[in-house]
């Protein structure tokens, strides 16, 4: 076993600052072996390499539980338009023209930008399948090159009103997704099924995705009730609300994670809690696209685990989970006029540990057996001040005021990926060059 000891000023663990603690990491597996005083860990692991993070405070890496990586290339296009107009004039207009190299460039851009903002794991809800599994492989390669932990939410999509590259029949989508699930069953990459939504995936497609999740013991993701038009459509076609209809299909259970859930009623939210389903909430995206405001206190009251996502960067347009922590709390306060409804501890947990719960991975917490995914925070950054000796403001400042300038280091699987806001594994000039090449291609008539 190869061990590295990360020496730091303090570790923020279980909402407590533990001063002068260090972390021993198994570099072979990427797991946290032990937390303790630096001198004690040195004695226990005399051959360990030492990595000194100086005065930084280690916090768990944030988990971006919902993203569309290719959309980073479409940021600023069709902004400030109604949802369907935004979709048609950005996603549907440009994504069919993306080549494999463009898919790779978009993923590399998305993953490196969010990693510089403190994300160590991302779930990419990916549906550009004009190149079959090669499309997914391009995203996987980008994650490897960036050094980020990746969940591919392999999207199953059979609505023929979408671009042809999105659309597969049920058999093809199932075989492609299952093949990827078998190939990537551990390590830094995990694949899960993701029937797109009730308006873009048939009941047969949704049930096929759910069955794969059951057979392989994984989560599955699905957009539900992001926009009111879906609620009205489902009521019109099936005589039920969206979650009720999904429940009638037998797919509401502990495998399910719904994205957005803006327009579910109290009965539907209660059903999710009773059946062990999860919510992935994207507050900035819901605001940017004028979707509405999800009733987060209702989900919390019914025991539904809530994780956070940035969504795609052309519908947010920032890509930071720490930003979403701030947004989930202050947006819910504004909606409810209740300052206590979602506090900073709730928000931090949603962006870290709950991400691990929803993705079914040992991430989002600094504890032996969890993955060594860390962010090093500088309390000398103005955005993290003031701070008393006892450090009582550390978490409120982290959630409500921290800027990316306070992120001194990022490590994923025990390996450093960002130092002083600069990427370690790939030159930032290379990322910019790839973006430029893709944008030149997309601009051509």
Image (spheres, rainbow, N blue to C red):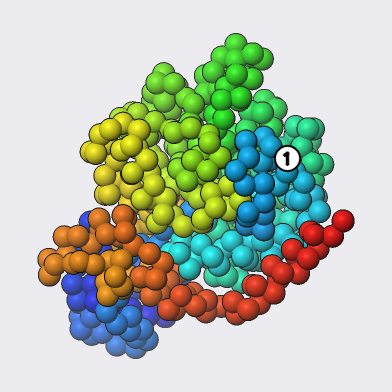
Residue sitting at x 73%, y 40%: 88
Element type where label 1 sits in the image:
helix
Residue at far right of view:
445
Percent position of residue 9, x then y: 24, 76
Residue at (56% x, 40% y) in the render:
289
Q: Is residue 173 left or right of residue 378?
A: right
Q: Position of residue 217 (x, y in %)?
A: 53, 42
Seen as rendered, the residue at the extreme bottom is 47
The foreground one among 74 and 182 is: 74
Residue 421 in sight from this viewpoint: yes
The answer to whether residue 187 is left or right of residue 39 is: right
Who's the residue at 26% across and 49% down the image? 345
Residue 378, given in percent of the width and then of the height, sits at 31, 73
Q: Nearer the viewer, residue 372 or 290?
A: 290
> Which quadrant, please, contains the C terminus?
bottom right
Q: Which image quarter is the N terminus in?
A: bottom left
Please identify the residue farthest to the top as the structure is shown.
239
Could you say which quadrant of the image residue 59 lies in?
A: bottom left
State whether residue 249 appears in this view.
no
Query: Picture coordinates of residue 366 (x, y %)?
Result: 32, 62
Q: Is residue 433 above or below residue 402?
A: below
Which is more toward the observer, 400 or 234? 400
**Residue drawn where x is 76% and y is 69% of the image:** 437
Place residue 296 in its image quadrant.
top left
Callout count: 1
Corner quadrant of residue 170: top right
Residue, disc 1: 88
Image height check: is 54 above or below 127? below
């Amino acid at each position: 076993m190869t061990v590295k000891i990360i020496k730091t000023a303090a570790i923020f663990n279980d909402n407590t600052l533990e001063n002068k603690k260090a972390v021993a990491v198994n570099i072979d597996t990427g797991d946290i072996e032990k937390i303790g005083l630096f001198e004690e860990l040195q004695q226990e692991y005399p051959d360990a390499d030492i990595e000194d993070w100086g005065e930084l405070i280690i916090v768990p890496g944030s988990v971006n539980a919902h993203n569309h990586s290719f959309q980073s290339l479409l940021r600023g296009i069709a902004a400030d338009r109604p949802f369907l107009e935004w979709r048609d004039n950005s996603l549907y207009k440009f994504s069919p023209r993306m080549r494999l190299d463009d898919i790779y460039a978009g993923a590399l851009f998305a993953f490196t930008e969010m990693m510089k903002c403190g994300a160590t794991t991302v779930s990419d809800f990916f549906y550009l399948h004009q190149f079959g599994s090669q499309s997914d492989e391009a995203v996987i390669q980008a994650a490897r090159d960036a050094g980020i932990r990746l969940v591919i939410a392999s999207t199953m999509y059979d609505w023929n009103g979408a671009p042809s590259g999105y659309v597969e029949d049920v058999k093809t989508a199932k075989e492609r997704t299952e093949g990827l699930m078998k190939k990537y069953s551990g390590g830094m990459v995990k694949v899960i099924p993701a029937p797109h939504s009730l308006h873009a995936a048939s009941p047969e497609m949704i049930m096929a995705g759910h069955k794969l999740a059951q057979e392989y013991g994984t989560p599955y993701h699905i957009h539900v009730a992001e926009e009111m038009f879906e609620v009205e459509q489902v009521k019109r076609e099936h005589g039920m609300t969206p979650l009720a209809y999904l429940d009638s299909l037998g797919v509401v259970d502990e495998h399910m994670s719904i994205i957005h859930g803006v327009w579910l009623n109290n009965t539907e939210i209660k059903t999710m809690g009773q059946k062990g389903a999860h919510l992935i909430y994207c507050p900035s995206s819901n605001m940017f696209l004028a979707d509405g405001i999800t009733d987060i206190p209702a989900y919390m009251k019914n025991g539904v685990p809530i994780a956070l996502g940035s969504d795609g960067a052309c519908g947010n347009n920032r890509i930071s989970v720490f930003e979403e922590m701030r947004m989930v709390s202050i947006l819910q306060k504004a909606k409810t006029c209740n300052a206590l409804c979602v506090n900073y501890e709730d928000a931090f947990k949603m962006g870290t540990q709950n991400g691990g719960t929803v993705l079914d991975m040992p991430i989002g917490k600094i504890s032996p057996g969890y993955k060594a995914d860390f962010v090093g925070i500088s309390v000398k950054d103005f955005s993290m001040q003031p701070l008393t000796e006892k450090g009582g403001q550390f978490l409120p400042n982290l959630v409500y005021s921290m800027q990316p300038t306070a992120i001194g280091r990022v490590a994923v699987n025990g390996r450093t990926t960002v130092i002083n806001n600069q990427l370690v594994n790939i030159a930032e000039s290379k990322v910019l060059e790839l973006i430029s090449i893709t944008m030149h291609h997309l601009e051509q008539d």
